[in-house]
Amino acid sequence: MAFDVKKIQSLSQEAINELQAIEKMGGLEHLKELNALLKQGVDSGELEQVNPMLPPYVQSIRKNLGFLTGNYASLQTHAKNRVFEIQQLNEQLSHIKR
């Protein structure tokens, strides 16, 4: 199997476009706001007055939302870093004559 520079360059550009789309996506503001409101509800003790089962349930949701937003921020950072790496690869491949 031959090393297909043109195909790699083409796919690399498509990958860069996809990664840049990930970078530009919103910061999940609504999820962060929901998480903050749920925290206020738990901290105030109001949820327990509504239903004693709500606080542990809401805490679980908050934990998962925090995990999600943290992973999303990490994904955006990785996308930015991979764009740079793929651009560097394309730069190196541009010197190969095939």
Image (cartoon, grey):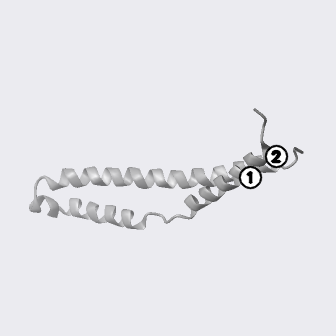
* Amino acid beneath label 2: Leu
Which one is nearer the viewer's eye here, 37 or 17? Answer: 17
Q: Residue furthest top?
A: 1
For the residue labelled by badge 2, is the local secondary structure a helix, a strand or a loop? helix
Mark nearer the N terminus (1 vs 2): 1
Classify residue 52 as left or right of residue 90. left
Residue visible at 74% across and 52% down? 87
Q: Amino acid at mark 1?
A: Gln
**Of 31 and 92, the residue lying toward us:** 92
Residue 7 percent location from the top left of the image = 74, 47
Residue drawn at (52%, 51%) of the image: 74
96 sits left or right of 8 in the view: right
Circle on res. 87: 1
Q: Is residue 62 left or right of residue 88?
A: left
Task: Where is residue 2? Give x, y as percent.
Answer: 78, 35
Total numbered labels:
2
Q: Position of residue 45 (x, y in %)?
A: 16, 61
Asked whether 64 or 41 is in front, the reply is 64
Separation of residues labelled 1 and 2 (CA atoms) = 10 Å
Q: Quadrant of the C terminus?
A: top right
Q: Residue 93 has which mark?
A: 2
Dot 1 lies on which element? helix
